[in-house]
Amino acid sequence: MSNSTTFHPNFFLLMGIPGLENSHLLLSILFCFLYILGVASNSTLIAVISVHESLHQPMYFFLVMLAVGDLVLSSTTVPKTLCIFWFGSHEISFNSCLVQIFFIHFICMTESGILLAMAYDRYIAIFYPLSYVTKLNPSFVTTVILVSVTRSLIIITPLVLLAWRLPYQGGNIIEHTYCEHMAMARLATASILVNVIYGMVIMVLTSVIDLFLIGLSYVSIIQAIMRLSTSEARRKTSSTCVSHLCVITLLYVPAFFSFIAHRIPHNHVPPNIHILVANIYVIVPPMLNPIIYGVRTKEIQQKAIKMFTGKFIDYE
């Protein structure tokens, strides 16, 4: 079943969630519902922002990028998970496994860069409102998107190549619902020290630094909010940041948990808990992100209602 030259198996077997086999059907119904809701809500968000020129602003363009990333992330993993649960389709080809690894890490890293840009957007909007349009012009938005995508491509491509170069002459069973870099690398019959070190380096040099810079921007933002003269002004200003903070939490908390869980013994984090969180990571944030922004952003609510009903509702 293996290529004798590269020692790559023709396929891997994704076994689902170990210990919860009897709950696969119930989980599949939940995953399917959340996936459909996520596809519908992200598609709606993209359509609303694309159609209405009044929403063609930096923050909303970044939201479109997040929505596109969420659609790709969930569609890369959830359909295969549902095939495992419904049809017992456990096989995934070696190359398809690498494709999953690439898109999972590529999208997550790109979204991290976009969230950093959104934090900068909030910083400029609060500290330099009069120069917001000139500082965050279309050229700036295009540059941010290109830099985020290019950074992810440059950093993630070697990660996939490191997984590809390993020999897999032992087992080909992955106890997971989709391919993760470390879950796949642990099946190799050679040292994976380089893979482990590279994974840690890119985590520190990208997500950790992004999160640190986001934290710095919000320290300044919170200080500015506390200096406002009235509670109403503080409420209105802080409300523009709450949605962004919720999305940051949804992206980083499961990601760091999964990263740490792969690097400590399984008796500390049971595999079923780890894999459940990993599935939450690719299903729940893509479903919740557009809902969070839709509920908390008056402009998006108004345009969405008008787009689908023809009625305009003023929340003031």
Image (cartoon, rainbow, N blue to C red):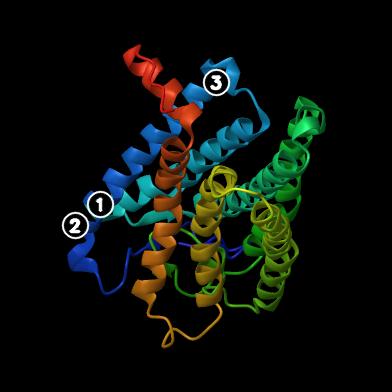
Q: What's the CA distance linking mark 1 and mark 2?
A: 7 Å
At 81% from the left edge and 33% from the top edge, which residue is drawn? 135
* Disc marking residue 30: 1
Amino acid type shown at disc 3: Ser
Amino acid type shown at disc 1: Leu
Disc 3 is placed on an element classified as helix
To which residue does mark 3 refer?
50
At 27% from the left edge and 44% from the top edge, which residue is drawn? 33
To which residue does mark 2 refer?
26
For the residues bearing labels 3 and 1, Cβ distance under 8 angstroms: no
Q: What's the CA distance linking mark 3 and mark 1?
A: 30 Å
Q: In the picture provided, is 253 more to the left or to the right than 154?
A: left
For the residues bearing labels 3 and 2, Cβ distance under 8 angstroms: no
Question: x and y percent of residue 4 in the render?
Answer: 58, 63
Q: In the picture provided, is 244 more to the left or to the right than 227?
A: left
Q: Which quarter shows the C terminus?
A: top left
Tag count = 3
User: Quadrant of residue 143 in the image?
Assistant: top right
